[in-house]
């Protein structure tokens, strides 16, 4: 632990204060940290004055950071801990550093690395041809493959799911994403400051508040901007409304997947009520344009408070009633219980976050462990069903809806009002680093910003909770019937675009 620097969420650090180790010590420190319950928040590469460097942000009940020079090749950490799996693949893809011995070393998305180096992946395929991808295969006379996607019906983004099956039984599911890599991180390093929030709130459209809040807090830390209590109240309410709307939408989808149509219809309508509350709060149903570095763009007056209070009082009994319909129906429980189970041990090994992790008895909630805005003095949620199956993931969502409702009602009683928001010219501190963490509705969202000697953004790193959790979906299909895939998929409801940044 002496090779790690303990830090705070949204704390500006001088880059010179971050430990800079040789790679052997760096590797040993990371592996020692994660061998029990330590988890990875960020592990990425960046280029500074022609030198590739590595930086890691780690967490248990505290946050730590450390770094080193990035060797062209190194002994993979994934061979000793699965928690590094996706991070090492991403580092190889982005900066051409090869994790020797990595058991699953192939591309995460589809793009040439940033350095112009030769491709480091062993597989014989071309980066410019997404279809030419080395899939895992299972041999056997009775084994067959089922391929789904990448083109899906409706507005679903591209993703390919390849099942290795014996009859209906799934041996293995491989999930291939990255079909429309948008280059978000690179874009965030090059556009004018005023465009950053517009990009952040479209990283994942259903997590506009979660991602934009992380960015705003990181910039506020680097620019030494203070946010008043009223703005913090609005931001917290907005994040909880986003959580409720998405959980309600997913419970509707889960009901539909088990052919229990009435709750799906009810919740489809009720979700719209919460989106409308977000519009009352911030002028947009998805919260776009509300959160900005320094505060919020719309003030919540007494009229907005009353509209929110009255509507919550009206719809909360309806939500409770529809949830009771879902969770008391034997036909629903017959499909939910023991379906798509991820064990606590596997969830811990791969670092599941959010409701997917809490459903596996991983209690981590960034609102409690690393509170921002108003969360430091608000009550934590408690999860009663943590068996790791579809039923647990659905139950955690039900619990979080009611917990979020209580949080919003509590905050609506606080008298503080946000000051009028006045955009200002923002200058970031030079040679600095900050990490921002928030509990968005899917789980831990994290943004890291590193500045150079002039205060320009040298590296902007984004991590959506889906980066951790897609592997959890793959594990949930082991030894399941392939017909349960839609149900398992909806119970996680992970983001394609939040992953494909």
Image (cartoon, helix red, strand yellow):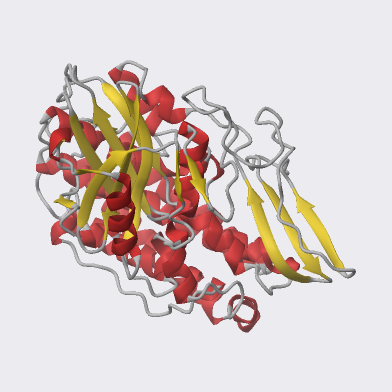
Q: Residue furthest right?
A: 141
What residue do we see at 28% from left, 19% from top?
A: 193
Whether residue 453 is visible: yes
Whether residue 304 is visible: no
What residue do we see at 13% from left, 60% from top?
A: 377
**In the rendered view of the protein, which quadrant contains the N terminus?**
bottom left
Rendered position, 283 above or below 398: above
Rendered position, 432 above or below 357: above
Left or right of 137? Residue 79 is left
The x and y percentages for residue 84 are 44, 54
The x and y percentages for residue 408 are 26, 56
Left or right of 9? Residue 308 is right
Front-lying residue, 453 or 305 = 453
The x and y percentages for residue 311 are 34, 54
Left or right of 427? Residue 481 is right
Q: How many marks?
A: 0
Front-lying residue, 454 or 409 = 454
The x and y percentages for residue 379 are 20, 67
What residue do we see at 43% from left, 51% from top?
A: 465
């Amino acid at each position: 632990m002496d090779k790690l620097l303990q830090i705070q969420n949204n704390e500006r650090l001088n880059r010179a204060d971050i430990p800079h180790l040789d790679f052997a010590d760096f590797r040993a420190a990371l592996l020692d940290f994660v061998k029990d319950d330590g988890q990875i928040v960020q592990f990425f590469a960046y280029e500074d004055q022609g030198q590739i460097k590595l930086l890691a942000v780690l967490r248990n009940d505290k946050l730590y950071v450390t770094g080193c020079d990035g060797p062209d090749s190194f002994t993979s950490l994934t061979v000793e801990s699965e928690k590094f799996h996706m991070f090492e693949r991403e580092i190889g893809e982005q900066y051409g550093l090869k994790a020797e011995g990595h058991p699953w070393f192939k591309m995460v998305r589809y793009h040439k690395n940033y350095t112009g180096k030769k491709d480091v992946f062993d597989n014989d395929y071309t980066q410019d041809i997404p279809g030419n991808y080395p899939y895992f295969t299972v041999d056997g006379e009775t084994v067959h493959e089922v391929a789904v996607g990448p083109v899906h019906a409706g507005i679903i983004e591209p993703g390919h799911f390849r099942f290795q099956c014996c009859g209906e039984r799934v041996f293995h599911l491989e999930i291939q994403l990255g079909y429309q890599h948008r280059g978000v991180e690179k874009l965030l390093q090059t556009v004018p400051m005023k465009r950053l929030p517009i990009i952040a709130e479209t990283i994942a459209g259903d997590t506009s508040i979660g991602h934009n809040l992380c960015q705003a807090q990181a910039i506020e830390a680097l620019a030494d901007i203070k946010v008043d209590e009223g703005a913090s109240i609005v931001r917290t309410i907005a994040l909880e409304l986003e959580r409720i709307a998405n959980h309600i939408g997913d419970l509707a989808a889960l009901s539909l997947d088990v052919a229990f149509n009435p709750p799906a219809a009810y919740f489809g309508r009720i979700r719209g009520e919460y989106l409308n509350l977000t519009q009352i709060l911030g002028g947009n149903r998805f919260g776009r344009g509300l959160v900005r570095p320094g505060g919020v763009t719309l003030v919540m007056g007494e009229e907005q408070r009353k509209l929110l209070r009255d509507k919550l009082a009206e719809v909360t009994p309806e939500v409770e009633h529809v949830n009771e319909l879902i969770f008391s129906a034997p036909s629903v429980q017959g499909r939910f219980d023991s379906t798509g189970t991820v064990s606590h041990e596997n969830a811990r090994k791969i670092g599941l976050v959010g409701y997917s992790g809490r459903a596996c008895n991983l209690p981590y909630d960034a609102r409690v462990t690393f509170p921002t805005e108003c969360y430091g003095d608000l009550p934590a949620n408690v999860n009663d069903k943590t068996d790791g199956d579809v039923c647990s993931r659905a139950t955690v969502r039900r619990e979080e809806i009611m917990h979020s409702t209580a949080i919003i009602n509590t905050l609506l009683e606080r008298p503080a009002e946000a000051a009028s928001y006045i955009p200002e010219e923002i200058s970031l501190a030079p040679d600095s680093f900050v990490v921002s963490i928030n509990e968005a509705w899917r789980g831990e969202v994290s943004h890291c910003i590193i500045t150079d000697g002039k205060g320009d953004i040298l590296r902007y790193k984004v991590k959506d909770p889906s980066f951790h959790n897609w592997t959890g979906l793959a594990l949930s299909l082991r030894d399941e019937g392939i017909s349960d895939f839609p149900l398992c998929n909806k119970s996680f409801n992970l983001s394609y675009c939040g992953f494909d940044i």
